[in-house]
Image (tube, rainbow, N blue to C red):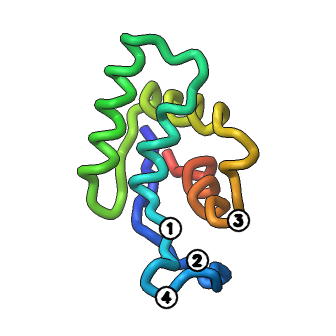
């Protein structure tokens, strides 16, 4: 089981945005990442959606079983380099370094 911090964080370097919008939405991003796995089958789509809902309904942290974490990692690994920007560094670190 992995514990992932899903609290939003500030992105102060985003000077192109007004202050209230300089926030990285971790829950939304992790939920979206789950669907980036190019090998996703229709059955896996249903499972991944359940994990996305679990993340969206969590408060502060989410606990993912090993199989759920593996699906998150598959989605993260399927994410294109264009989607991995400076804004995502903290989010990716939280997933990769999630304590067991």
- Which residue is located at x 50 percent, y 67 percent? 24
- Which residue is located at x 28 percent, y 42 percent? 54
Instruction: Report how far apart the C-alphas of labels 3 and 1 lie in the structure.
Output: 11 Å
Instruction: Report how far apart the C-alphas of labels 4 and 2 lie in the structure.
Output: 9 Å
Which residue carries the number 3 mark?
86
In this view, the residue in front, 84 or 68, is 84
- Which residue is located at x 51 percent, y 86 percent? 18
Residue lying farthest left?
Answer: 57
For label 3, the crowd category at 10 Å Cα-Cα, with few meaning under 14, some 14 to 19 and many 20 or more, is few
Q: What is the x, y in percent for residue 44?
A: 41, 16
Contact, CB < 8 Å: mark 3 with mark 2?
A: yes
Q: Is residue 32 above or below residue 27?
A: above
Q: Element under label 4?
A: helix
Instruction: Report how far apart the C-alphas of labels 1 and 4 lie in the structure.
Output: 12 Å
Q: Element under label 2?
A: loop
Q: Which comes sooner in the sequence, label 2 or label 1?
A: 2
Instruction: Report how far apart the C-alphas of labels 2 and 1 lie in the structure.
Output: 7 Å
Residue 19's label in the rendered image is 4
Residue lying farthest right?
Answer: 81
In this view, the residue in front, 41 or 68, is 41
Contact, CB < 8 Å: mark 4 with mark 2?
A: no
Q: Is residue 25 above or below residue 78?
A: below
Which residue carries the number 2 mark?
11
Picture quarter containing residue 85?
bottom right
Task: Give left or right: position of 56 versus 75.
Answer: left
Which of the two marks, 4 or 3, is nearer to us in this view?
Answer: 4
Residue 24's label in the rendered image is 1
Which of the two marks, 1 or 4, is nearer to us in this view?
Answer: 4
Q: What is the x, y in percent for residue 79?
A: 65, 38
Contact, CB < 8 Å: mark 4 with mark 3?
A: no
For label 2, the crowd category at 10 Å Cα-Cα, with few meaning under 14, some 14 to 19 and many 20 or more, is some
């Amino acid at each position: 089981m992995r514990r992932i911090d899903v609290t939003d964080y500030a992105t102060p370097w985003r000077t192109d945005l007004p202050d209230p919008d300089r926030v990285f939405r971790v829950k939304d991003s992790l939920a979206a990442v789950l669907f980036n796995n190019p090998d996703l089958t229709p059955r896996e789509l249903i499972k991944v959606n359940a994990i996305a809902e679990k993340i969206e309904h969590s408060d502060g942290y989410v606990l993912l079983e090993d199989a759920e974490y593996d699906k998150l990692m598959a989605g993260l690994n399927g994410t294109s380099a264009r989607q991995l920007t400076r804004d995502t560094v903290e989010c990716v670190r939280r997933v990769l370094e999630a304590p067991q």
